[in-house]
Image (cartoon, grey):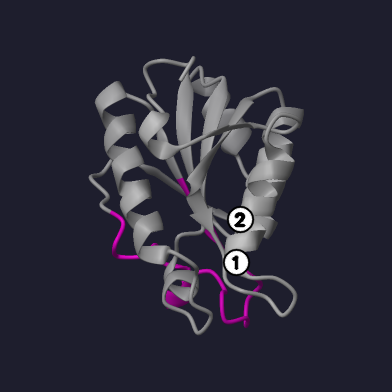
Amino acid sequence: MYALLILDIQVGLVHGPEKPWRCEELLATVNALMDKARSAGAAIFLARHVGPAGSPIEPGSPLTMLAQELELRGGEIVFEKRRPNAFEMTDLVGNLRSRGVTGVVVTGMKTQYCVDSTCRAARDLGFDAVLVADGHTCSDTSVMKAQDIVAHHNATLDGAFCRLVRAEEWHFCDSAS
């Protein structure tokens, strides 16, 4: 059984000064994946990245709120994380295992931080990690364009750390997707 894991699609990243590459497409993809998960009865987990008290992303900050473009229907599990790896210092592992989840379908932001470290950790923890190739993004950096960061991570993570799929090819009811 697979769960959908959506990382850090929050106001400060979606609507911040550094515009994410293909953000509108990402939001549409994530909403479509949530619909697929709901139809299959799969759990949906949404992580919100928070920082220390006094920081711009302290708990409760408007910047840490989920982006309003996400089509939430109720029943999603929203949790806070303080590290790039969504499993570190959270109860995500326990929540997944208590639901009989054996795999996570990873989407969200930012590719080179939270998406990367969460995919690697999922595999180390014994979960089948599935990365949605067109379901994650980031912003340009001084060294690399976002499009290239996404392509690099898709190529690097595929195989050794996760299974790479396109959103339209994934079906939660069929683990062989």
Q: Disc 2 to disc 1, how far (Cα)?
A: 6 Å
Closer to the camera in the image, 75 or 85: 85
Residue 113 is marked as none
Q: Is residue 117 left or right of residue 20?
A: right
Q: Position of residue 175 (x, y in %)?
A: 47, 16
Q: Residue at x 37, y 26 (%)?
A: 42
Q: Are marks 2 and 1 in contact (CB under 8 Å)?
A: yes
Q: Residue at x 36, y 17 (%)?
A: 173
Give the magenta-colored segment's residue range. 46-70
Q: Is residue 76 left or right of residue 8?
A: left
Closer to the camera in the image, 44 or 169: 169
Q: Position of residue 41 (x, y in %)?
A: 31, 23
Callout 2 secondary element = helix
Callout 1 secondary element = helix
User: As displayed, is residue 46 above or below residue 167?
Assistant: below
Task: Say what amino acid the circle numbered 1 marks.
Answer: Ala
- Residue 39, by quadrant, is top left
Task: Say what amino acid the circle numbered 2 marks.
Answer: Val
- Mark 2 lies on residue: 150
- Mark 1 lies on residue: 146
Q: Is residue 92 left or right of residue 116?
A: left
Q: Position of residue 67 (x, y in %)?
A: 36, 65
Q: Position of residue 10 (x, y in %)?
A: 44, 65
- Residue 92, by quadrant, is top right
